[in-house]
Image: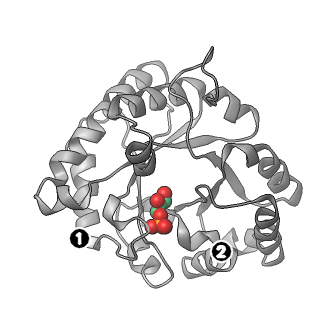
Amino acid sequence: MAAGGRMFLVANWKMNMTRDRIETYLDALERERLSSMLSGTRHQIALAPTHVYLQDLSREVLRRGLPVKIFAQDVSSRSEGAFTGEVSVRNVLDVGAVGSILGHSERRRYFQETDADVARKTSLCLQAGAIPLVCFGESREERDAGETLRVLRHQVAPIVEVVTKAFRENENIPVYLAYEPVWAIGSGKNASCSDIEEVISTVLEGFSWPVPPCILYGGSVNLENISSLAALENLAGLLVGSAWLDPETFLDSVRALS
Ligand SMILES: O=C(CO)COP(=O)(O)O
């Protein structure tokens, strides 16, 4: 857990939820009094729905007084203009999101996003005042070939560059990264604590960051492993897919960390 005992807990719903399921989810958070559950902690919660639910979800968490921030799952690498079907950083901010997940491995893998695209998106977020949560991580083949740290450095280097540029204009920029090994996502096999620690120190110490990023972990986080993962020094939070599609498991996870 990062200094101060604060964890940033982000549920990436991917393309799974519907209006009904979101309502049931929020009902559970309200009924179980998420606010009081968090009151003795410094944890922060974010939910990341698909773009179409951002506005309703932002309004609903506000109406219900839930201590929840809203993140988009992606934004365009263009700021505005004739880009049919794209959704800009400004669009997601307009409807209540405070930041966006960027460069998730599913976007890199199925939609051919490159490190350069992810860097552009990060830069647009920082310029617009949105919090970038940039994912990076190696594939099984890269890990087996002993290439993990080289691959990660390659993914993170362009982010350091845009953060450094943005920092010259605004020293208060928030930077979040999420180490999500591709082989750990949805597989039931999480990265080991020592692997995560090695990656965190490589990313923190291997670059000259103008402001140290908060680093989260994602990949098969569940009720069995959450407490040991959260105990990792320097780990600033968790980015969770499958397990947190279920509000009860999400609430049990928050309880486990409270
Ligand atoms: O991709 C993830 C979060 O962005 C992790 O997914 P799982 O928690 O389902 O492994």
Mark found first going from the N terminus, 1 or 2? 1
Say above or below: 4 vs 128: below
User: Residue 69: where, in percent of width, then height?
Assistant: 68, 51
Name the image quarter holding residue 196. bottom left
Neighbor class of circle 1 (other Cα within 10 Å; few <14, some 14-19, many 20+) is few
| Residue marked by disc 1 | 194
Residue in the image at 83% along x and 76% along y? 31
User: Residue 228: where, in percent of width, then height?
Assistant: 39, 79
Question: In the image shown, does 39 or 62 lie closer to the viewer?
Answer: 62
**Residue 163 left/right relative to 248:** left
Say above or below: 34 vs 138: below
Residue in the image at 34% along x and 58% along y? 182
- The three-letter code of the residue at mark 1 reads Ser
- The three-letter code of the residue at mark 2 reads Asp
Say above or below: 169 vs 30: above
Mark 1 Cβ and ligand 1 under 8 Å apart = no
**Residue farthest bottom in this picture:** 224
| Labelled disc at residue 7 | none
**Residue 162 left/right relative to 202:** right
Can residue 4 be seen by looking at this rendering? Answer: no
Can residue 1 be seen by looking at this rendering? Answer: yes
Say above or below: 232 vs 107: below
| Residue marked by disc 2 | 246
User: Residue 136: where, in percent of width, then height?
Assistant: 35, 48
